[in-house]
Image (cartoon, rainbow, N blue to C red):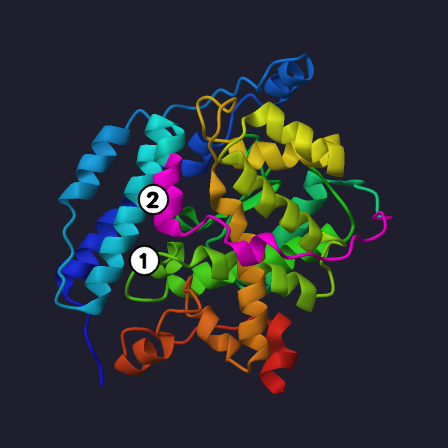
Amino acid sequence: MITDIPAPVRHADERHHRILQRIPFSRHLNPCNVREARHAFRGGAQAPPFRYQPLIEADSLLRELDEICPSDDHPAGALVARTIQSTALLIRALRDRTPQAFHQLALRADWYPDAEMLSLTFPEPPPDPQPADQSSAVMIAKLEEALQARQLHGWRVERDTVMSARVLVDSAKRLLRVNPLARFRPRDLRRLIAHEVDVHVVRAHNGQAQALHCFSTGLPGSLATEEGLALVAEEEAGAASPGVLSRQVEVVRAIHDARRLGFRELYNDLAARQGAALAWGICLRIKRGLADPSIPGVYAKDSVYLRGRMLVRQWLDDGNDIRQLYVGKVSLTDPVAQWLEEGWLKPGRIPELWKKRLAS
């Protein structure tokens, strides 16, 4: 049976997508003074004095989102409505920068780790023998080469210093951002192609071929599948970082603790177990966005990596079809088979990374 998506739903999805194309949300989420803030923290400040690029359009963006009313006479209408609501919560968090605003964002996205995640343990690996001796220029060249080899036309790589990650993908703009100050291990040159290109870019690229833009920027609840699949792709490529799962356990526990601890207390706890460098990196990731990181509060998004990896690995081990995860940025729980049968979704290309699994 073929089901057309009503024009009001497509129009609402288009209006929402134009907002995502206009606003580089990562520029407003990440501190723009990380080096200075870290220096002040090392000098004894209770918390790093983060500064942010203000989202001065926040109120007008929220009014614009409120005006978008997708029709509810088709399941895609409810899908677009939930996507719009998720964007509104992110905008409010970036406008208010309070623990309460980020708490509402985490609740809607189901980012807080549960008892099962908090109880996971993995063996500690030996020290990584590979030095971080590869420049950002080398990484950029490898990413550009991978985009070209996969015929991912319209995608480009851009340098960006306002990032807490070394590499990120902006699907709405068909853009990979790389921090020019970052250094990489030789393994990262393969690992990040598997992670960023063969998962994030390809899923977004396939989603752009669908009738709705939200399949390219991410359905509500799809982030755990997105990041979990990316970690599994690293493993499939034989390029996963040693100890990545044990580090993700530390991240999950830090997210749990950050709901009751400020930056300094959280950092001290982590540094005693994991060392100063990892403690700083985790605290930066989960306290970013907050106006006052010295008080309890958390940006809990990074919990999705471990949860997603465990769920995706089990889903694949249970014999499910990897092709269902490449129609776009969908989650394991989305009824992809039904949508394909109804005709308002179509299959997407599958990276060579998965050819052995497809052949089995």
Side (left or right) of 21 relative to 82: right
Question: Is residue 221 a member of the stretch shown in magenta?
Answer: no
Residue 185, position as x, y percentages in the image: 77, 46
Is mark 1 in CB contact (under 8 Å) with mark 2?
yes
Residue 254, position as x, y percentages in the image: 59, 40
Reading the image, the residue beneath label 1 is 213
Q: Is residue 146 visible?
A: no
Reading the image, the residue beneath label 2 is 20
* Region in magenta: 102-129
Along the viewing direction, whichever of 72 and 117 lies nearer the viewer: 117
Q: Quadrant of the N terminus?
A: bottom left
Along the viewing direction, whichever of 57 and 125 lies nearer the viewer: 125
Along the viewing direction, whichever of 107 and 230 lies nearer the viewer: 107
Residue 23, position as x, y percentages in the image: 35, 37
Question: Is residue 108 a member of the stretch shown in magenta?
Answer: yes
Side (left or right) of 62 relative to 140: left
Amino acid of disc 2: Leu
